[in-house]
Image (cartoon, grey):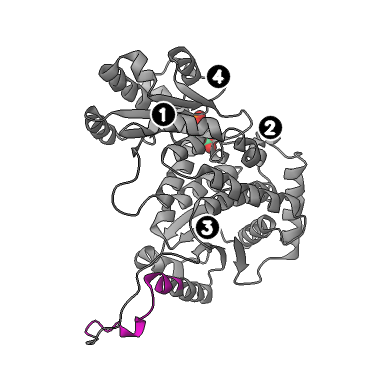
Amino acid sequence: MQIDLQFSTISQAAIQKSQESRKILESRSGSGNDFLGWLQLPEEQSGHVQKYLEIAADLQKLEAVVMVGIGGSYLGFKCLYEALRPAVGPVHGPEILFAGHSLDGHYHQQLLEYLEQKDFGVVVISKSGTTTEPAIAFRLLWGLLQKKHGAAEASRRVCAITDEKKGTLRQSADSLGFHSAVIADDVGGRFSVLSPVGLIPAAIAGVDIYSLLQGSMEMCDRLRNDQSPENPAVQYSAYRNGLYEEGKKIEILVYYQHSLQYLAEWWKQLFGESEGKNGLGVFPASAGFTTDLHSLGQWIQQSERTIFQTILDVEEARSPVLAKQENDGDGLNYLAGKSVHDVNRVALQATRKAHGEGGVPSLRISVPRVDEFHLGQIFYFFEYACGVSAYALGVNPFDQPGVEDYKNSMFKMLGKPGY
Ligand code: PA5
């Protein structure tokens, strides 16, 4: 994985500040330091892979598996699934479905109707075990499973991923005998993709979780042992904090492959919940080019100069090549011999140049290809960089006090006891 900066906009002061923040993270002396379990997940989780594969093998026998969760208990696996599944056509193994990631009644109604005819299982993921959206979805799905199979047989089709001791989901898992796995106390939701939260659903979907952990381990070694200003996490942190101080308030994560859409969604949660507090924080947005160049491109090129871009560049891809035609009726013979991917990468370079000339600084992160190993690298890179960046900004990266406000207001309106 490689990082390059188009402009030498990183100030020495910003680099020094981010180096200090990296030290705070590594010495575990910053705020939220009881939530640093994610730092060693790649190595620690390698010891659990066999168990996860055994759970996965059981659920893989079914026609469909519904992954129930929201926020950090949803986006990591959703990202892996969308990045690695075939772009079109059926997936190999059980059909993968999602629930509990919204309160969309129509969606859940159609899902239940569809599942009536399927032999399905459920992976329910909730660290707290009490989050409303997945709790509602699981109650509906568990009701259907019991109706179809009776409680004992239904429970063999469920895996609960939750806290070791706390929460109603843990109680249900233990009393009803679900498969289950533990989310460690010191791993927060948005930092949990490399825990059972991401690994068990990924194993069910046929993702090579060994390779995913290998990639994250490689990145872990690189970032944690490099004390130099060239540490890529320090550079990324310095880049974005330096620009923020200059009034660039919005960062757009730009991807050029449809399959990376949910990587951007995962990244938005990671940075949005970690940094957006105390009246501070870059607003994390995303765009899929070249598609969104035909919608957001105008705004990016010429609107308020408050934005900067982080571009994900994939170097290699299997891609069809344009052949030369006798009659150049569509006027595309000038592209003969080039693949669609070649054209996409030229679009990246050209757009970067145009946006740069229009006053939009950019940073490019490139990976050779989209596979488990490199996704593992990317996850760990952004998590580590997020910890460094939030400390450089001066906030606790590991809490999310603002998320409670809407919940309290909703519970009061719904008449939940105690609100
Ligand atoms: O990052 C976070 O902590 C949140 O986004 C949570 O993941 C999300 O609210 C779901 O919480 P839980 O896993 O407790 O159901």
Q: Which residue is mark 4?
A: 166
Q: Which residue appears at 55% of the width and 47% of the height? A: 211
Q: Which residue is mark 1?
A: 58
Front one among 316 and 349: 316
- Mark closest to the chain's N terminus, 3 or 4: 4
In three-dimensional space, the C-alpha distance between marks 3 and 4, rounded to whole angstroms, equals 38 Å
Q: Is residue 242 left or right of residue 130?
A: right
Q: Could you tell me how many numbered marks the image carries? A: 4
Which is in the foreground here, disc 3 or disc 2? 2
Task: Evaluate whether residue 402 shows in this view.
Answer: no
In three-dimensional space, the C-alpha distance between marks 1 and 4, rounded to whole angstroms, equals 26 Å
Q: Residues within 10 Å of mark 2 (few under 14, many from 20)?
A: some
- Residue 61 in the image: state x and y as whole percent: 35, 32
- Residue 181 drawn above or below residue 380: above
Q: Amino acid at mark 2?
A: Asp
Q: Amino acid at mark 4?
A: Lys
Q: Is mark 3 within 8 Å of ligand 1?
A: no
- Mark closest to the chain's N terminus, 2 or 1: 2
- Image mark for residue 402: none
Which is in the foreground here, disc 1 or disc 4? 1
In three-dimensional space, the C-alpha distance between marks 2 and 4, rounded to whole angstroms, equals 17 Å
Front one among 385 and 398: 385
Question: What is the secondary structure assignment of the residue under circle 3?
Answer: strand
Q: Amino acid at mark 3?
A: Ile
Q: Does the magenta-highlighted stretch encompass residue 26?
A: no
Q: Which residue is mark 2?
A: 34
Q: Which residue is mark 3?
A: 250
In three-dimensional space, the C-alpha distance between marks 3 and 1, rounded to whole angstroms, equals 44 Å
